[in-house]
Amino acid sequence: MAPRFNSIIPDFKELFLDKFSRKVTADSDDLLGLPYPYVAAGENAKDALFYLDTFFINMGLLRLGLVPQAKNNVENILYLIREYGYVPAANRKSMSSYSQLPLLAWMVRDIYRSTGDKGWLRRAMPDVLKEFNFWNSKEHKSSTGLSSYLSGDQKENILTEQESAWAGSLRFEKTKNYNPVDLNSILYRNALIINDLFKELEGEENTTLLNRARQIQELLDLCWNDSEQFFYDNNIDDKKPGDIKTLAGFTPLFTKLVEKQQAEEIQKHIKDFVRPGGLACTEKGKAENGKPWTAPLCYAPYLYFSIKGFFNYDFMEDSADIAINWLDMVKKVYKETNQIWEWYNVEEKTHLMEGVENRAGAGWTMGTYIALTDELGLDN
């Protein structure tokens, strides 16, 4: 089985090292200069380093043994947080006023695991803590104690969707005033990752981080729909979980936030998202033409969060079947188009969907493909 997946990975390695490789050291009309070469989000990503995309690109780079390239990506992100106090969504000037899912702690941990360089880790830690504090600051913390996307009057702004990356989807259509389940799940795990790194350096745990992790874990009950046994974004105005079921509801599995019994209830909802080519972003009844981040579309980041979450709780049959169906589809479309795409129509197993623009050459899809091939043991 393995060779049918492995055969296109050398192409991805070449793309990372050639077509996606950039060096932009000085500011331009569109881009912020960065001190290190980097892997852009894709061939048509306007030469930019994108924050969310880089997490998945680095998963691929590290598994390909391209540690220097992955480290350079992280060095650039550390540079940006030192300059701005947060990590901009990209080094495009038009995207520098907001951030996205805070995954810097994960990336720093992965580089440290690959290099064992404690000196580098020590230099990076203040910036990792700065990002964690940014997302737990007054600007992002809601009245509930959970974190949200922007605050105050800005809630009605499109920036809410841009920070979430789900711009244009059904997810935030009714109101922007939500505590997102994925953001808070990530912040829960961030606190634990940063504590582990702190312990690695100082030989002791950080009680402030551990207390915040416990607080988030308890407060995430606000996102739990007890009658449906699934996580939704918490509607702050209505003081209850929302009603748009999305793959974000699986992120507490990705971050190991729940106990096994609760995870088993969450797992039962896989059937609402499964399609022939993987997992749709939203449940089956929510499909609408012209809506990005909506069924039957699948974006690699949330497919990975979901499948990795299933791995974490030993739901191996479901996760393997879904992953293999997605890998098969991505390879099939690559052979047909000679391109890797930002999203896929997992109902029709294609890169096409009426009314929704797709982007060719998506690094987050390649990184996810490489990571899943590795984690399923299909790379031997």
Image: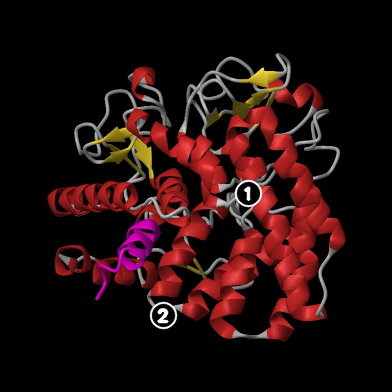
206 in relation to 251, above or below: below
Q: Earlier in the sequence, mark 1 or mark 2?
A: 2
Q: Are marks 1 and 2 in contact (CB under 8 Å)?
A: no
Return the residue at label 1: 186
Identify residue type, mark 1: Ile
Q: Magenta span has 379?
A: yes
What span is in magenta? 366-380
343 in relation to 167, above or below: below
Q: Magenta span has 268?
A: no
Disc 2 residue crowd, few under 14, some 14–19, many 20+, Cα 10 Å:
few
249 relative to 202 in the view: left or right: left
Residue 365, labelled with which disc?
none
Main structural element of the magenta stretch: helix, strand or loop? helix
Identify residue type, mark 2: Gly
Q: Nearer the viewer, residue 47 or 272?
A: 272
Disc 1 residue crowd, few under 14, some 14–19, many 20+, Cα 10 Å:
many
274 relative to 178 in the view: left or right: left
Query: Residue at (52%, 28%) from the top-left corner?
Result: 229
Residue 180 position in % (x across, y down): 63, 33
Residue 65, labelled with which disc?
2
287 relative to 380 in the view: left or right: right
Q: Is residue 27 visible?
A: no
317 relative to 74 in the view: left or right: left
